[in-house]
Amino acid sequence: MFTGIVEETGTVAGIEQRPGGMTLLIQAQRVLAGTRLGDSIAVNGVCLTVVRHTAMTFEVEVAPETLRKTSLGQLRLGSAVNLERSLAADGRIGGHVVQGHVDATGEVVALQADGEGGMATFRGPVALMKYIVPKGYIAVDGMSLTVVDTGPDWFSIALIPHTRAVTIARHYVPGVQVNLEVDILGKYIEKLLAARPGLS
């Protein structure tokens, strides 16, 4: 489990394409403190398992299903990625409950200045929009963000200067693909209600 509070941005230092998936080598610093083989690290919001590591790098293997559902297949050498270690039992939940299980990809539609920060608009799959509500949470590339407004196939969020400075949001331009994970609470509520005929 993660909280959507990015600890640092790493750099893709190696990509190995294989018939059965892909291996990523990522340069990092902070997230490697105390990291062991088998630990989980969210890379752009995708929960991945550390299979090798050194003092300055770690490797993760990406399965074909993950490549189909996320934007990780678009990474290139030198790409910046958001990184977060899984939450320790005594840790703070600074954002919201993020599983690292990406629901779908979306797209940056527009960026505009808004005070000292900015407003970003994303296009998302229509099927996900029922889970995205104003003032609710959404994870975009692993960042826990608060939704400002929504439409039939879009939502907007406010980006404070700090978020833009310490995450890959600083590289967003219209057309960039992003990983989306909606708040799991909405899915649970929907399923519970569906199991009780007559409730609306």
Image (cartoon, rainbow, N blue to C red):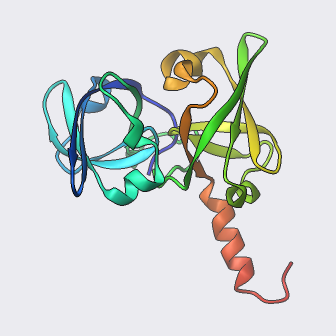
**What residue is rendered at 39% in x and 54% in y?**
66
Is residue 192 shown left or right of residue 178? right
Answer yes or no: is residue 94 visible.
Answer: no
* Side of 137 where 87 appears, left or right: left
In the picture as drawn, the residue positioned furthest to the front comes out as: 19
Quarter of image, res 145: top right
> Residue 140: horizontal and vertical position, in percent?
57, 39
Q: Quadrant of the C terminus?
A: bottom right
> What residue lies at 70% left-to-right and 85% top-to-bottom?
195
Spot the residue most to the bottom. 197
Residue 188, position as x, y percentages in the image: 64, 69
User: At 50% across and 52% down in the image, what residue appears?
Assistant: 102
Residue pictured at 55% horizontal, 18% vertical: 170
Image coordinates for residue 156, horizontal then vertical, percent? 75, 35
**Which residue occupies the foreground of this view, 101 or 110?**
110
As drawn, 151 above or below 168: below
- In this view of the protein, which residue sits in the foreground, 102 or 76? 76
Q: Residue 87: percent from the left, percent from the top? A: 41, 45
